[in-house]
Image (cartoon, rainbow, N blue to C red):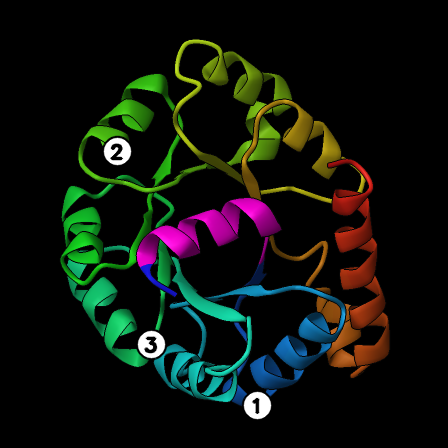
Amino acid sequence: MIKNELINFILEEKIVAIIRMLDKEEAIEVTEALVKGGIKLIEVTLDSPNSLKTIEALTEKYQNDEVVIGAGTVLDSESARLAIIAGAEFLLSPSLNIDFIKTCNRYDKVAIPGAMTPTEILTAKENGADIIKVFPASNLGSSYIKSIKGPISNINLMATGGISIDNIIEFVESGSDSVGIGSSLVDKKLIKSKNYKELTSKAVEYINRIKNNM
């Protein structure tokens, strides 16, 4: 996908599944289970073991499918460049780093920096961010998203941190254009027991919750 198409794809699909601290083989198995359940956006965090190799493997595996692989916990421009070389099509950072945004734009990839305050959110947008990750979302609450969207409704926001099956619709209805979901979806207990069937069922539950409220 070209960049604008991918931005729209992220906003349409809503859910980005966050894979953190899994090795390559585990990440591949988990991704397979999530994709079976309808998840199409996978974020591999760079603090995971051999994360770049994982991104390479997943990008190759799903290059002909409508599944897009991204990189998360990207802390600086050099890490962003390495993730892009590995195949990441969208990149997320927990913080606002202007050089990170510039690197994503230089390589025509989707830049999703983290921000909290209105000033940070506007600064990110003015410096070329495509979507702003509001983090930590659960600490701020869905009402915070609604308040931000009042005066700056033209900025795409992704709520991340503490999003669960119980509050996902609350955040979407409050103005979150997409959500990043970690442990409540990518359940470490299920992964440890290799219960990938249940992991697929969780993915289906999230997808249905979104579709039934759109």
Considering depth in this image, is 112 or 154 the residue closer to the camera?
Answer: 154
Q: Main secondary structure of the magenta part?
A: helix
Q: Residues within 10 Å of mark 2 (few under 14, many from 20)?
A: many
Q: Residue at x 74, y 79 (%)?
A: 192
Q: Quadrant of residue 74?
A: bottom left
Q: Which mark is on residue 124? A: 2
Instruction: From the image, tell me which residue sits under label 3.
Output: 87
The amino acid beneath tag 1 is: Glu
Name of the residue lying farthest toward the top = 151
Q: Which mark is on residue 25? A: 1
171 above or below 64? above
Q: Position of residue 17 (x, y in %)?
A: 59, 60
Q: Position of residue 98 (x, y in %)?
A: 17, 42
Which numbered disc, 1 or 3, marks the residue closer to the eye?
Answer: 3
The amino acid beneath tag 2 is: Ala
Q: Residues within 10 Å of mark 1 (few under 14, many from 20)?
A: few
Magenta highlight range: 3-16
* Secondary structure beneath label 1: helix
